[in-house]
Image: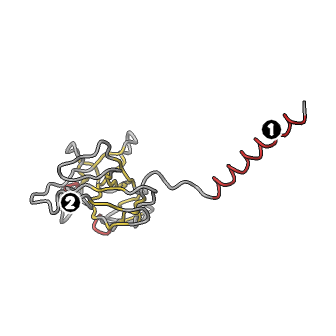
Amino acid sequence: MPFSQIMVRMTGTFVLLISSLLAAQNPAPPETPTVTGVATYYRSFADITPTLLNTTSPRIFLSRIWPTAARLERLNAMDKNWEPGAWPIRCGTVAHSMEPIEIKPAASIDVQLEWQRSVDDIENPHWFVTTDSIQRPLSGEYRLVIEYAREPWTIFHRPKQVLRAVSIEFGLWPDSAPWH
């Protein structure tokens, strides 16, 4: 093999090696925002105080109708599918309906967990209620979901694609810890 071909191959290999080292040192930001402030175990949904942190490089936008609402999903132990909880119904006028809610990179926003319609009784819940009105035992594995978009989202403009930020999974054991 001629010396020039050896040099070309060595140069190509060197460039690939340097590129991979630089990529490892500067990892790309996550593709979805991060839901923080979620522990692995709770006795009540009221104790959960999540935050949405934009760990992505582009800005993101929240819905004007549900700007700071996190939704519950419960793991169905039988089929291993996540079942969304009933969505709350609110009436009223949406403030600043034409102004998008923007979260810039590295910024965060406190989120409210909308759990009240996802249980059978707000004061003394025993059942988780799905969007299909199916009642599941309250104790179980859950996660939070927050919808967002990469383009401005107002009451009159729904983005082409609505994305989801999902929290870590957590257990809800109102009566006792799962290991008792």
| Depth check, front residue: 14 or 155 | 14
Q: Position of residue 144 (x, y in %)?
A: 35, 56
Disc assigned to residue 111: none
Q: Between residue 113 and residue 118, name the one nearer to us.
A: 113
Looking at the image, which residue is at 68% across and 49% down? 20
Residue 131 drawn at (x, y percent): 22, 45
Please name the residue that numbered disc 2 is placed on.
Answer: 116
- The one nearer the camera, 137 or 23, is 23
Q: Which mark is residue 8?
A: 1
Relative height, residue 36 to residue 160 (above, below): below
Across and down, in percent, residue 27 comes to 58, 55
Crowding near the residue tagged with mark 2, few <14, some 14–19, many ≥20 C-alpha atoms within 10 Å: some
| Marked residue nearer the N-terminal end (2 or 1) | 1
In the rendered structure, which amino acid carries the disc numbered 2? Gln
Tag 1: residue type?
Val
- Disc 2, SS: helix
The N terminus, quarter of image: top right
| Viewer-side label of 2, 1 | 1
